[in-house]
Amino acid sequence: MNKSHNIHLKRHTHLALEMLEKDFWGTSQNESALISRCYELRKKPLKDFEVEDFRMLISQQIGLKYLLPLAFAILRENILAEGDYYEGDLLKAILNIERDFWQNQPGLFADLKGLLEQNKTPLVDAHEALWDIYQQVIYQMGENTN
């Protein structure tokens, strides 16, 4: 499986998250490898991101409004796109985003819902546990599913 995606958005993928957010964190002072890697990724142009880069930052709830549209483009190509861990780990990271975020970003939530509804059959066939997590997210958001 090709874990690297050449992502083509209309604009801004040549920029890094810190430029888009206008929030510069500097250099990590923490010895944690995870924290250090998150600091590094905030400086990396989005066009150079791999699936694992998206998975890592999304799982840490970093830069979601910029990363999710790009991650959705990856999932449109392969709903079970895989970072470093397992098939579907990018989708799992997205499904674990806190409810408050989705409530404040109804457009992104609608995009997620549409993406998953379009991929229901392959998702259920290949990884029913992810579909079950999605159903829980929908329930928590007070949404109805078909």
Image (cartoon, rainbow, N blue to C red):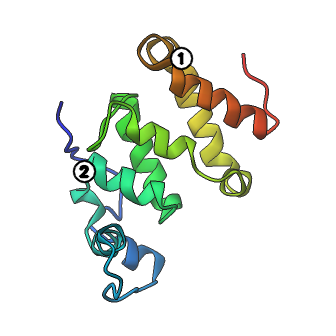
Q: Which residue is mark 1?
A: 120
Figure quadrant of the N terminus: top left
Relative to 25, is 64 on the left or the right? Answer: right
Q: In the image as oriented, which residue stretches furthest toward the right?
A: 142
Tag 2: amino acid: Glu
Where disc 1 sits, the SS reads: helix
The part of the image, by quadrant, that contains residue 57 is: bottom left
Q: Quote the CA–CA distance across marks 1 and 2.
A: 25 Å
Local crowd size for mark 2, using a 10 Å CA cut-off: few (<14), some (14–19), many (≥20): some
**Residue 28 x %, y %:** 33, 84
Amino acid type for the residue under numbered disc 1: Lys
Q: Tell which of 114 and 36 is nearer to you.
A: 36
Q: Quadrant of residue 105?
A: bottom right
Crowding at mark 1 (Cα within 10 Å: few <14, some 14-19, many 20+): some
In the rendered structure, the answer to whether residue 71 lies left or right of residue 100 reads left
Per the rendering, the mark at residue 38 is none
Residue to which mark 2 is pinned: 50
Identified at 66% across, 57% down, the residue is 101
Of the pair 35 and 138, the residue shown nearer to us: 35
Measuring from the top left, give residue 126's x and y in whole percent. 41, 15
**Residue 142 vertical placement versus 37 (above, below):** above
